[in-house]
Image (cartoon, rainbow, N blue to C red):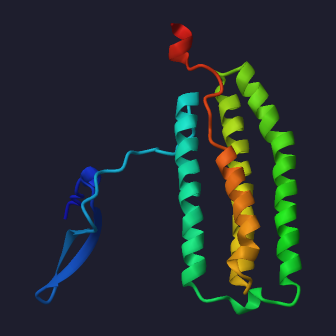
């Protein structure tokens, strides 16, 4: 029997299903499962080939991290406290984790991000420089988010949200400071 697959760009998830008809007859059908979403663009977060693509991807990721901050607050209010996060030295451990996250952020900023930014500014059309800059930025935003996660774990361990608020504020300020800015004029502006 020929394998007649439906169009994958139709916006549905298609799964093969075998059905038993009669005693010995088996038929293969494709069943549509899911909601009819518009077809997703392929390679939305593929490796960037230009600085404009890199900026677009970085801004998309930045927005996802910003949206996650209120979700942490919501989860902290709605979820039950986790008993194993309330051990005797939990407060000290989470404060040390927060301090280590800040130290890691500043070290990565100085040793990875700023040199990559300098190279990118000097060679804006170099794809490798764009990728290095984007990768170091991704590391920085993940470290900034780990500060928020430390505050969330501090909160889930039985502390009040006021006690964990400094973690949230510091992490949020770090994430907000990482908004991907246009580093050098785009190729269209340079051509004018």
Q: Percent from the top left, x then y, of residue 107?
A: 87, 48
The residue at the point 58 percent across, 49 percent down is 62
Point out the residue furthest to the front here: 162
Q: Left or right: where does residue 12 sit relative to residue 149?
A: left
Q: Where on the picture, by quarter, is residue 147?
A: bottom right
The residue at the point 27 percent across, 61 percent down is 12
Closer to us: 177 or 93: 177
Residue 22 in view in this figure: yes
Closer to us: 159 or 64: 159
Q: Left or right: where does residue 122 sit relative to residue 108?
A: left
Q: Left or right: where does residue 64 sit relative to residue 177?
A: left
Q: How many marks?
A: 0
Residue 50 in view in this figure: no
Which quarter shows the N terminus? bottom left
Q: Percent from the top left, x then y, of residue 83?
A: 72, 92
Q: Percent from the top left, x then y, of residue 90?
A: 83, 83
Point out the residue furthest to the top here: 192
Closer to us: 110 or 91: 91
């Amino acid at each position: 029997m020929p394998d007649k697959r439906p169009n994958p760009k139709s916006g549905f998830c298609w799964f093969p299903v075998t059905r038993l008809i009669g005693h010995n007859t088996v038929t293969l059908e494709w069943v549509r499962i899911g909601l009819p979403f518009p077809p997703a663009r392929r390679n939305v977060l593929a490796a960037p080939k230009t600085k404009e693509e890199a900026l677009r991807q970085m801004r998309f990721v930045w927005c996802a991290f910003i949206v996650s901050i209120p979700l942490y607050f919501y989860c902290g209010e709605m979820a039950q406290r986790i008993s194993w996060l309330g051990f005797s030295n939990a407060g000290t451990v989470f404060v040390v984790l927060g301090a280590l996250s800040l130290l890691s952020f500043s070290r990565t900023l100085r040793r990875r991000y700023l040199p990559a930014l300098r190279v990118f500014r000097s060679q804006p059309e170099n794809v490798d420089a764009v990728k290095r800059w984007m990768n170091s930025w991704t590391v920085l935003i993940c470290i900034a988010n780990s500060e928020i996660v430390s505050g969330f774990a501090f909160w889930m361990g039985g502390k009040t949200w006021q006690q964990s608020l400094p973690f949230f504020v510091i992490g949020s300020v770090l994430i907000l400071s990482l908004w991907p800015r246009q580093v050098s004029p785009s190729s269209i502006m340079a051509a004018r």
